[in-house]
Each structure stands twice: as C-alpha cells, then as structure tokens.
Image: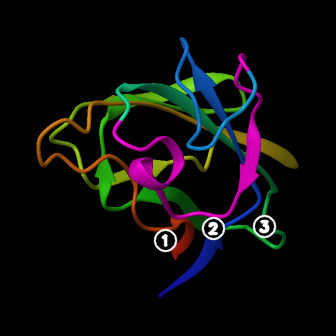
Amino acid sequence: MSHSIRLIGPWFVQPQDGLQFIEQREEIAAGRRIKMPASWENLFGNAKGKATFTRTFNSPTGIDQQTLKILLEDLHGCGTVSLNGEQLIEFGNDDHHLQIDVTSQLKLNNRLVVELACDPSGHTLCGLHQPVILRIEET
C-alpha cells in the first residue's frame, strides 16, 4: 500500500546561461514561480538551454517503517536531481521515468532541485510533463 503527495506548486524556475522565458522583457532572466507540470515549450518556446526547477516541501509526519521515493514521470531532457544540496541522480535523454529512494535524505524542511537541459529542436519533447510525486510506501 502506498500514499502519494503531488508536488505541484509552487516551483521556482530559474533559466541558466542566457536562456529566457517566453515574453521576457528584461535582459537578465529573473526566476518565476510556476505550477507543475510545465512543458519546456510553454516556458521557453523552442529555445535550447538549461533551467533549474526548485521546490521546497516539509517531510511527511508519522513516518516510521515506510520508504519515501521521489517519482519523476514523463521527464524529457538531461540533468540532475538533488535533495537538500546532495545530488541524488544524473539522468539522460532516455531516462523518462525516475524513482529515487529519499528515505534517508529527508529532513524536516526539504529542497528538491531538478536541473534540466533541453534541446527542443526537431520533434523532441522537453520538460517535466507530469507532476513530481513524493510516494510513501509500506515496507
């Protein structure tokens, strides 16, 4: 038996290395708060680049014998996933479904960071196309 918490929002998105949001007027890209999921195309159009997606959340209470996992489904691009400053995994363009055991890394207050690089040229999808899930599983 499991219970899922959808980490929909707010997420903070920060473009990197000159990447800009669609309809951005400033020269330097300031980060934005968004709800997930969000496709790369809706945020950045067809621009190639890198962005950091950050979500803070509190640890679930009453956890005793459970396993906690972060699930990223329908993920397109390459990059890394970190929790509380510790890199958990590096993923590539072919890794569309990630399940990461975070039981030992969770703290009272947590900071999840997904660094994502995308090149939407051609017909390639980019971005996080499903909500990020914190799954609590009975062991």
Instruction: Measure the C-alpha gap from mark 1 to mark 2.
Output: 6 Å
In the image as oriented, which residue stretches furthest toward the top? 17
Q: Quadrant of residue 84?
A: top right
The residue sitting at 72% across, 67% down in the picture is 64
- Span colored in magenta: 27-46
Query: Are the two marked residues, 1 and 3, in contact with CB atoms closer than 8 angstroms?
Result: no
Which dot marks residue 65? 2
Which dot marks residue 139? 1
Query: Are the two marked residues, 1 and 2, in contact with CB atoms closer than 8 angstroms?
Result: yes
Q: What residue did someone put label 3 on?
A: 60
The residue sitting at 62% across, 43% down in the picture is 23
For the residue pair 97 and 103, the one nearer the viewer reads as 97
In the image as oriented, which residue stretches furthest toward the bottom? 1
Dot 1 or dot 3: first in sequence order is 3
Instruction: Measure the C-alpha gap from mark 1 to mark 3.
Output: 16 Å
For the residue pair 65 and 42, the one nearer the viewer reads as 42
Identify residue type, mark 1. Thr
The residue sitting at 19% across, 35% down in the picture is 121
User: Could you say where residue 38 lies in the image, as x and y percent from the top left?
Assistant: 51, 59
Disc 1 residue crowd, few under 14, some 14–19, many 20+, Cα 10 Å:
few
Of tags 3 and 2, which is closer to the observer?
3
- Asked if residue 13 is positioned above or below residue 79 in the image, the reply reads below
**Does 21 appear in magenta?**
no
Q: Is residue 82 left or right of residue 48?
A: right
User: Could you say where residue 27 lies in the image, as x and y percent from the top left?
Assistant: 71, 17
Identify residue type, mark 3. Pro
Query: Are the two marked residues, 3 and 2, in contact with CB atoms closer than 8 angstroms?
Result: no
Q: Quadrant of residue 53?
A: top right
Q: Quadrant of residue 46?
A: top left
